[in-house]
Image (spheres, rainbow, N blue to C red):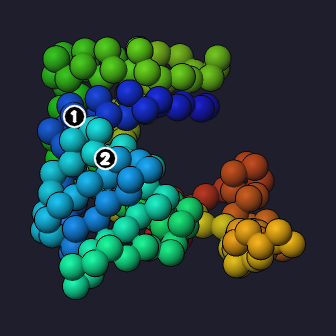
């Protein structure tokens, strides 16, 4: 099955958890996404700030009073998104009580307006999925990364080039051709 939450729903989920605490070793910003962390240390990001963090592609960090560009681009954004998802999973495991009618109502309200699911997914399946994931922290999340290398186009653009032969094993997992062993640690 397939489920997709939109940006508004993502923000509301974060806000319903009371925000996501993230440690920053230095002030960071991204004028494109709206991320603006003014001080180093642990910051609890609300929904809007979390979305700006997750969407940050042009991250800058402060070093010796000057702003420096993070050169990781989309790979850095992907890593930040994965980190944020693991933080959300840990917070959900700690704080969501799926035996509470109020919690269930909040989830259904947020989901009803902001969630797209495939035609084959029933409400009962979605509820069972939420119950399953309520007890799973970041240690239960499998992550996969496709192998890439830096590449410069004829026009001078810096892009990532997929190593197709090395990528097939990971792609086969998503194609349903290789069963995932849940007893094995997540790959990164």
The answer to whether residue 105 of the structure is visible from this angle is: yes
Relative to 96, is 148 above or below?
below
Vertical relation: 16 (above or below) 64: above
How many labels were placed on the picture? 2
Q: Residue furthest right?
A: 154
- With 37 as the anchor, is 150 left or right in this view? right
User: Of the numbered discs in the image, which one, if any, rests on residue 79?
Assistant: none
Q: Say which label, 1 or 2, has the lower sequence index.
A: 1
Q: CA distance from mark 1 to mark 2?
A: 9 Å
Q: Which residue is depicted at the point 52% across and 31% down?
A: 4
Residue marked by disc 1: 15
The residue at which mark 2 appears reads as 50
Q: Residue furthest bottom?
A: 64
The one nearer the camera, 69 or 135, is: 69
Going by the image, does 185 lie left or right of 14? right
Q: Position of residue 13 (x, y in %)?
A: 29, 33
Residue beneath the point at 47% across and 61% down: 58
**Residue 184 in sight here:** no
Residue 121 falls in image quadrant: top right
Estimate the x, y position of residue 8 in percent, counting from the top left. Answer: 38, 27
For mark 2, give the secondary structure: helix
Residue 4 located left or right of residue 174: left
**Which residue is at the front of the view, 188 or 41?**
41
Give the quadrant of the N terminus.
Answer: top right
Q: Residue at x 21, y 48 (%)?
A: 45
């Amino acid at each position: 099955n397939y489920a997709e939450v939109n940006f508004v729903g993502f923000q509301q989920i974060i806000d319903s958890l009371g925000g996501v605490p993230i440690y920053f070793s230095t002030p960071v910003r991204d004028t494109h996404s709206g991320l603006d962390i003014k001080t180093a240390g642990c910051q609890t990001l609300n929904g809007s700030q979390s979305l700006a963090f997750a969407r940050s592609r042009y991250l800058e960090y402060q070093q010796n009073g000057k702003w420096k560009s993070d050169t990781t681009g989309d790979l850095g954004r992907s890593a930040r998104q994965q980190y944020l998802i693991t933080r959300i999973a840990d917070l959900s495991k700690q704080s969501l009580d799926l035996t509470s009618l109020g919690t269930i109502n909040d989830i259904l309200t947020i989901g009803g307006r902001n969630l797209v699911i495939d035609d084959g997914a029933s409400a009962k399946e979605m509820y069972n999925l939420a119950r399953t994931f309520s007890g799973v922290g970041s240690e239960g999340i499998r992550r996969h990364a496709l192998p890439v290398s830096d590449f410069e186009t004829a026009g001078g653009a810096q892009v990532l080039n997929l190593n197709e032969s090395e990528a097939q094993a990971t792609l086969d997992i998503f194609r349903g051709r290789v069963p995932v062993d849940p007893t094995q640690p997540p790959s990164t």
